[in-house]
Amino acid sequence: MFKKFINYCKTCYDELAHNTTWPARAELTQSAVVVLSASLIIALVVWVMDLVFKFVMSSIYPN
């Protein structure tokens, strides 16, 4: 059982160290900017939807 685990760890390391193609720094930065921009846009859309929903609900159920 323990030998299987050690063999699995060695295989994983070999895969990551020798067979994986890692992105360049510029590509990684560009991807991070895309993800950050998309996250901010989605957050803004959700915030606007929340404001609209709050306005509609306060119009229907006034305090």
Image (spheres, helix red, strand yellow):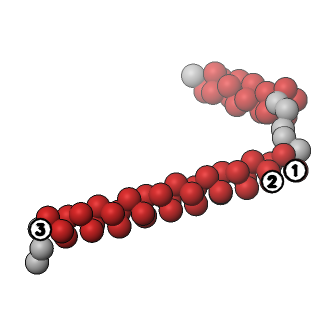
Which residue position is annotated with label 3? Answer: 61
Picture quadrant of residue 9: top right
Residue occupying the point 66% across, 51% down: 35
Q: CA distance from mark 2 to mark 1?
A: 6 Å
**Front residue of 37 and 23:** 37
- Decide if residue 60 is on the left or right side of residue 6: left
Quadrant of the image occupied by residue 62: bottom left
At label 1, the amino acid type is: Arg
Q: Nearer the viewer, mark 3 or mark 2?
A: 3
Q: Which quadrant is home to the N terminus?
A: top right
Q: Quadrant of the C terminus?
A: bottom left
Whether label 2 touches label 1, CB < 8 Å: yes
Q: Earlier in the sequence, mark 3 or mark 1?
A: 1
Residue 14: mark: none
Residue 29: image tag? 2
Q: CA distance from mark 3 to mark 2?
A: 47 Å
Give the CA separation, mark 3 to mark 1.
Answer: 53 Å
Tags 3 and 1 touching, CB below 8 Å? no
| The one of 48 and 59 positioned closer to us in this rendering | 59
Q: Badge 1 is on which residue? A: 25
Against 25, is 60 above or below? below
Q: Position of residue 28 (x, y in %)?
A: 80, 48
